[in-house]
Amino acid sequence: MDILTAMSPAQAAAMNIGLLILMMLGLKMYVGARRGQMKLPSGETNAEFNRATRVQLNAVEDVPVLMVGIAGLAMLGMPAWYIHMCGLVLLVSRVLHAYGLAASGGFSIGRAVGTMGTLLVFLAIAGALLVHAFIG
């Protein structure tokens, strides 16, 4: 645990952004694998494959802007623990959301917890950026 708390803000941001990029790669590979399993040529789709692509696209909506926010936290010199908290809550939230959506197109606990966690990270990052932009 000391290795995480001993990181500089830039190192903490780099680690968390790297993990999020790997997660996004995993989601991309999931969609490609589903296309292959369903034997769907490029450009063709069905309801099941649409849900598989939504697994990736839901992350695409939120993760990139929050990665920029994590980089912004590092540029402002926020503590590494805060950057880790935001990054790791986001990572876990998006994995839960992806798992929940992949398993069911309807309500799932994974989707609900993942959505709430993502919203909390949006607020934590936006709040910290705004406060530190004006307070310094």
Image (cartoon, rainbow, N blue to C red):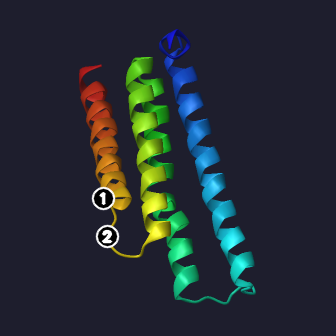
Q: Is residue 11 visible?
A: yes
**Residue tagged by mark 2?**
107
Could you tell me residue 129's position as x and y percent? 33, 33
Quadrant for residue 76, please give it.
Answer: top left
> Which label was assigned to residue 112?
1
* Total numbered labels placed on residues in the image: 2
Could you tell me residue 60's position as x and y percent? 51, 60
The vertical placement of 26 against 30, above or below, is above
- Give me the residue at 39% from left, 34% from top: 86
> Which label was assigned to residue 40?
none
For badge 1, the amino acid type reads: Ala
Question: Is 19 on the left-hand or right-hand side of 55?
Answer: right
The vertical placement of 6 against 23, above or below, is above
- Dot 1 falls on a residue whose secondary structure is helix
Q: Residues within 10 Å of mark 1 (few under 14, many from 20)?
A: some
Quadrant for the C terminus, please: top left
The mark that comes first in sequence, 2 or 1, is 2
Question: Is 124 on the left-hand or right-hand side of 28?
Answer: left
User: Nearest the camera: 11 or 46?
Assistant: 46
